[in-house]
Image (tube, helix red, strand yellow):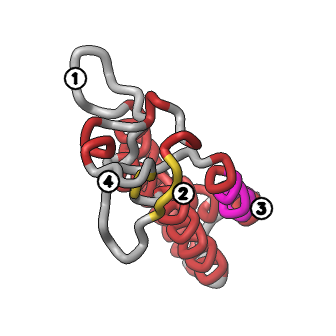
Amino acid sequence: CAYGLVLGQIIGRWGNFFNREVFGGYTDSLLAMKFPASMARASDISADIAAHMSDGCIQVHPTFLYEGIWNFCLLMLLIFALKYKKFHGQIILLYLMGYGIGRALIESIRTDQLFIPGTTVPVNMVMGICVAIAALTAIVIGISRAGNKDEAEKA
C-alpha cells in the first residue's frame, strides 16, 4: 500500500511542473526553475519573487522537484526497511513519518501556504510534524510490542 502511494506522489508531482504550481520563493541556486510570470497564479508570486523578476520571468525553488526527490528517497527507504520490519503496519507508519518530515521541511519554502489564523505558521507544516510524531510513536510502540512477543515465544 505505502509503495503505491509514494510512487503515485512521485509521478503526481510532475503534474505540478506542467501546471507551473507548487513552487517556492525566489532562488538563484543551481536547481532554480525559471518561467514566464504570466504562467503562474498572481497569488503565488510573492513580493520577493516579483522584486527579482526579469524579462517577465520568475525564478523560483522547484518544490515539486524537491518533494519528488524526497519521495523517491523515501520509497528506497521503504523498500530497504521491508527486510527489517518487526510488525504489520510498520512500513505505512514509516511512510507517514518520512512524508510528514519531508512535507514540513519543504512547506517552509513554498509560496502557496495556508497559515494558522493569526500566525505565520503554515498549517501543512504543523500537520506534517504531528503526523511524523504520531507515526514515530506508533513505530516505537509497535517495535516494543513485537519485541515483547518474541521474548514470550522464546520462554
Dot 2 or dot 3, earlier in sequence: 3
**Distance from the alpha carbon under mark 4 to that under mark 2:** 14 Å
The answer to whether residue 21 is left or right of residue 121 is right
**Residue farthest along the left direction in this orientation:** 119
| Residue closer to the observer: 17 or 83 | 17
Residue identifier under label 2: 64
Which residues fall within the magenta stretch? 5-15
Residue identifier under label 3: 4
Which of discs 3 and 4 lies nearer the camera? The answer is 4
Residue identifier under label 4: 26
Circle 4: is it few (<14), some (14-19), or many (20+) Cα within 10 Å?
many
Amino acid residing under circle 1: Thr
The answer to whether residue 18 is left or right of residue 46 is right
Dot 2 or dot 1, earlier in sequence: 2
Residue at screen point 62% across, 56% down: 17
Which of discs 3 and 1 lies nearer the camera? The answer is 1
Residue 2, image x, y percentages: 70, 60
Dot 3 or dot 1, earlier in sequence: 3
Asked whether disc 2 touches disc 1, contact meaning CB atoms under 8 Å apart, the reply is no
Asked whether disc 4 touches disc 2, contact meaning CB atoms under 8 Å apart, the reply is no
